[in-house]
């Protein structure tokens, strides 16, 4: 069974290229966010200024702290700085005395996870292995956490591995495949690790130094808030991943290893501008935008799904100025008062922001909260003025404005979104979508697929999973993944309409169902009924 769906429209140009690049960068980082959070919590608890550190602001101290963070002696106070100094100076004789959890995790574990993920994205498991080996050379050849190096060397190494395998594809004598594959990957990995150590590592060290100097320059001249002029419009157009994951995250991690926190983690993730915009639409909006804004505010602020406010901004483009002003106000607050996060807040929920801020003390948490409140207040006030000044025109023309903005947001993103589906469901009853046909094979493995394979598809999978459970149907696996990872083993693939053609190309033998509304699609009931009929006819 397949469904008929409109041909996917691909917009060309610079924006699409940046979107794809940003998607690739986020694909390297996002699967490993749990590791970043784990490292962040360990630093929050055990560095000298942490909860259990020697200089704990709470007066708590746990004796084995030095061993956990790496101190090599009785004093936990020298642990973190001492460990990093030993690494930087290459003090081989004393290094083992400083080995703990914090230093090795940020120096080796996190970059290698990124490299392995990047390699797998390019060339599967084999690419991931070679990428990890090559990145190890880059790491050892530098004296700072090499996130940028991992994000560049990882894909390059995997691509080289792919090209190497093509040289003798189909030319290996039977029985020698494993020998050739293992030795070729090992030898290539060795060569790339050496190149990374002597050449690539120093180059990336210079690139990191230049980027870090640029950030320091902006801070020294109090110009960092101007970054919001780029970041806030980029978010609405889904161009922010390249900036956030390509620059802010790696530079922020480097700052966090030195000072325990970084303002860069809050430039894009601050939920203040979004909640300010949505509250303004709640009080001063019209029609569907006003009705749906309160629910969207809850999802944005507590769930961290920022994309849900993008249609509101697109329905009234002048409000992007309010977002810029609010973002700049939040950055200014953190810059002046020294606020920052200890690790990336992903998703950008107030809950995640709190967890990443509290480790640097109650004072830092209050500063971060203040930056969120100020960003929200500035955005709210400016948006309120904009909405009030055009209220009469909006009441007359509201009919298709918000629905068109939702469609434009999905076009900008170029992928399915449960958040957008929820807005559409709340702004207009019922949904279009493509009706399903009768499956010719048993449905046991259902996959929800979207571009990133995370938030949107995970929410849709959860909805269908619950429907199967309520219907008393067992033995059907419902999972979510990125379209690029579809391998043809799924019996049924569910995607948003604009992505169905891509999903069919990845998994041509699967049953494909297109939906408009991931949160409340009528096709789910048809899928459940179809599976029930299959089970009954098979009994």
Image (spheres, grey):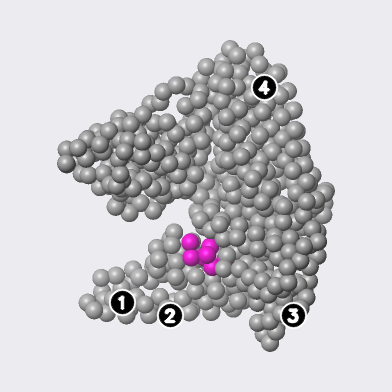
Q: Which mark is on residue 178? A: 1
- Give the mark toward the camera: 3 or 4: 3
Which picture quadrant has residue 530? top left
Q: Is residue 24 left or right of residue 334?
A: left
Disc 4 marks which residue?
283
Specify the segment rendered in magenta.
111-117
Seen in the picture, residue 496 relative to 259 is either above or below; the reply is above
Let me know if residue 360 is in the magenta part: no
For label 3, the SS is: loop
Marks 3 and 2 sit apart, C-alpha to C-alpha, by 40 Å
Which picture quadrant has residue 94? bottom right
Q: Residue at x 48, y 79 (%)?
A: 190
Marks 4 and 1 sit apart, C-alpha to C-alpha, by 66 Å
The reply to whether callout 3 and callout 2 are in contact (CB within 8 Å) is no
Sequence-first disc among 2 and 1: 1
Let me know if residue 112 is in the magenta part: yes
For label 4, the SS is: helix
């Amino acid at each position: 069974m397949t469904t008929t769906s409109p041909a996917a429209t691909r917009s060309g140009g610079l924006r699409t290229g940046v979107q794809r690049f940003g998607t690739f960068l986020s694909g390297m980082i996002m699967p490993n966010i749990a590791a970043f959070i784990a490292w962040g919590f360990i630093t929050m608890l055990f560095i000298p200024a942490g909860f259990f550190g020697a200089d704990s602001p709470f007066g708590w101290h746990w004796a084995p702290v030095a061993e956990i963070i790496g101190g090599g002696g009785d004093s936990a106070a020298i642990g973190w700085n001492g460990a990093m100094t030993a690494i930087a100076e290459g003090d081989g004789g004393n290094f083992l005395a400083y080995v703990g959890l914090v230093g090795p995790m940020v120096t080796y574990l996190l970059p290698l996870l990124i490299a392995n993920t990047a390699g797998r994205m390019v060339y599967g498991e084999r690419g991931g292995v070679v990428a990890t080996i090559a990145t190890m050379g880059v790491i050892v050849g530098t004296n700072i956490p090499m996130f940028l190096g991992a994000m560049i060397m990882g894909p390059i190494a995997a691509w080289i591995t792919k090209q190497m395998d093509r040289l003798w594809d189909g030319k290996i004598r039977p029985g020698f495949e494993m020998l050739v594959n293992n030795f070729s990957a090992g030898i290539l990995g060795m060569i790339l690790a050496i190149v990374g150590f002597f050449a690539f590592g120093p180059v990336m060290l210079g690139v990191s130094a230049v980027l870090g100097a640029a950030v320091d320059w902006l801070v020294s001249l109090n110009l960092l808030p101007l970054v919001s002029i780029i970041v806030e419009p980029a978010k609405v157009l889904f161009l922010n991943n390249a900036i956030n994951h390509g620059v802010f995250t790696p530079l922020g991690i480097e700052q966090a290893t030195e000072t325990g926190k970084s303002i860069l983690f809050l430039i894009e993730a601050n939920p203040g501008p979004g909640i300010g915009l949505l509250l303004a639409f709640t009080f001063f909006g019209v029609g569907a935008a006003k009705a749906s804004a309160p629910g969207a505010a809850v999802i944005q602020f507590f769930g961290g799904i920022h994309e849900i406010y993008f249609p509101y901004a697109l329905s009234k483009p002048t409000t992007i100025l309010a977002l810029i002003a609010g973002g700049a106000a939040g950055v200014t607050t953190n810059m002046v008062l020294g606020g920052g996060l200890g690790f990336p807040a992903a998703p950008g929920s107030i809950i995640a922001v709190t967890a990443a801020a509290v480790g640097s003390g109650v004072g830092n948490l209050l500063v971060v909260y203040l930056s969120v409140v100020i960003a929200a207040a500035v955005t709210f006030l400016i948006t309120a003025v904009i909405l009030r000044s055009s209220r009469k025109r909006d009441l007359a023309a509201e009919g298709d404005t918000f629905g068109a903005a939702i469609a434009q947001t999905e076009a900008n993103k170029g992928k399915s979104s449960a958040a957008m589906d929820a807005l559409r469901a709340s702004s207009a009853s019922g949904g279009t979508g493509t009706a399903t046909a009768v499956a010719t094979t048993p449905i046991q493995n259902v996959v929800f697929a979207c571009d990133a394979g995370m938030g949107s598809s995970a929410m849709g999978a959860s909805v269908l999973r619950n429907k199967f459970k309520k219907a008393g149907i067992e033995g059907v696996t419902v999972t979510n993944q990125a379209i690029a990872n579809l391998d043809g083993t799924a019996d049924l693939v569910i995607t948003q309409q604009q992505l169905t053609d891509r999903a069919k190309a990845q998994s041509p033998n699967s049953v494909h169902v297109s939906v408009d509304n991931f949160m409340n699609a009528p096709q789910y009931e048809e899928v459940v009924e179809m599976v029930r009929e299959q089970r009954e006819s098979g009994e």
